[in-house]
Image (cartoon, rainbow, N blue to C red):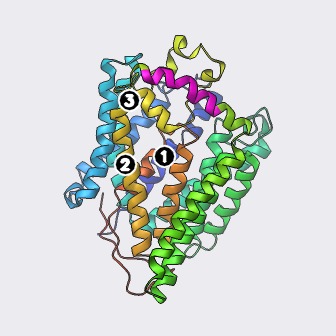
Amino acid sequence: MEPSPGRDLFAAAALLVLVNGPMLLVSRRVFDLPGVWEGPIIRPLLLAVAIGGTLFVVLDPSRPVRALDRRQRVAVGAAVLFGLWAAVSTAWSVNPEVSLWRGLVYATFGPVALVVIGLGDRRFVRVLASAFGALLLASVLVVFLWPDVGLDHNDDWRGVFSNRNGLAPVCGVGALAGVAAAPRHRLLGPAVVVLALVGLAGSGSRTAWLAFLVSVGLASALVIGRIWTRRRPGPFVPAVVGGSVAAGVVSVIVAVSVLWNESTFVQRRTIWDVLFDHITDRPIHGHGFQGFWTVPELIGGHELLRRGSAHNSIVEVLLETGLIGLALWSTVVVLALGGTAVSAWRSPSMPAWLWFALTVFLFVENLTESYVNWFSYNWLLLIAAAALPARRALVAPVWRTPIPTESVTA
């Protein structure tokens, strides 16, 4: 059964809410509100996404959860348990008022992810390219028409986001979505790619460029290499697999080595060192979900902590939810990376390329930004990637041919 247009609209709306920037901008600039998660605009929108995604799954007559295989159940289950563990952390949180409701919202990201993958490949590509293309167009317009809002104090682009680190990753995702949309949507796809690359350059973000180049290079090497080995089977297969993995690892090592002494990385390493002492104080269960950064006494000891983020999701998860939270978070990430890589190898197609490239991009971004400290599209898309249905192996690879999948309808 083809998904209803209502699901397309809900998925697009959920993505627009979970990029956070536009609703924070409206809250602060239009209504002159503080722009906190508990605000009268922001919390209702987050709750609408949480409740809407859950209702789509619960009320779906096809019962999408029953159609999940074991790997998919583990992925969705780990995501839900991560949110529940975050909510349970209220019991020991340094700020229990924020941990409970925020954790419960995170627990619903599993059902929302099922709605996303239930769209199928074609609709997902169109929704992702359209939603992020609209954000990029709005950001470019704000930069030129409202520079007081669109530019930061260094004249770097931030568009409709709070800072350049909000805009740049959206540009990266938009560029990947635009490439995947181009074969079927010859106006939308290239337009989104252009907007994304212009925004990425204007933001001046080095970390987003790193994630983008690594994701494109690794995904392209794997998919193109697989197509080549299908025509030349034999000993070339392990060589291509090993070469693709080695190329990705080497590119990350080289890029990090070059940028290691850049100020942005020096500051991040300093933050991680300072936070390590706090992590060792509560290594198993953490300080409570999203509570640490709301306590002035904890962040007042170092200037860089006042920026309100660990700038690394692994560090953030350890800080807030401890080793138990990290185990659940890592389960989703490992399943996402492994599952999309295997799918790209089995079924080398444009949708498979997009999902693998997208997952690599999101993961690399998590190494330099704390997406767990936000209600982020990054976490939603990683859950969706981890819970994707397995793709059937192609007899003969054709780049533009859509690959039939046993898709979950949500």
Q: Residues within 10 Å of mark 3 (few under 14, many from 20)?
A: many
Residue 177 in sight here: no
Question: Label 2 belongs to which residue?
Answer: 332
- Dot 1: what SS? helix
Q: Main secondary structure of the magenta part?
A: helix
Identify the magenta region.
Answer: 268-280
Instruction: Based on the picture, tell me whether residue 276 belongs to the magenta stretch.
Output: yes
Mark 2 to mark 3 CA distance (whole Å): 15 Å
Q: Quadrant of residue 191?
A: bottom right
Disc 1 and disc 2 in contact, CB within 8 angstroms: no
Please report whichever mark, 3 or 1, sits nearer to the chain's N-terminal start: 3
Amino acid type indicated by mark 2 = Val
Count of numbered tags:
3
Question: Label 3 belongs to which residue?
Answer: 321
Q: Residues within 10 Å of mark 1 (few under 14, many from 20)?
A: many
- Dot 3: what SS? helix
Q: Is residue 330 above or below residue 101?
A: below
Q: Is residue 375 above or below residue 179?
A: above
Mark 1 to mark 2 CA distance (whole Å): 14 Å
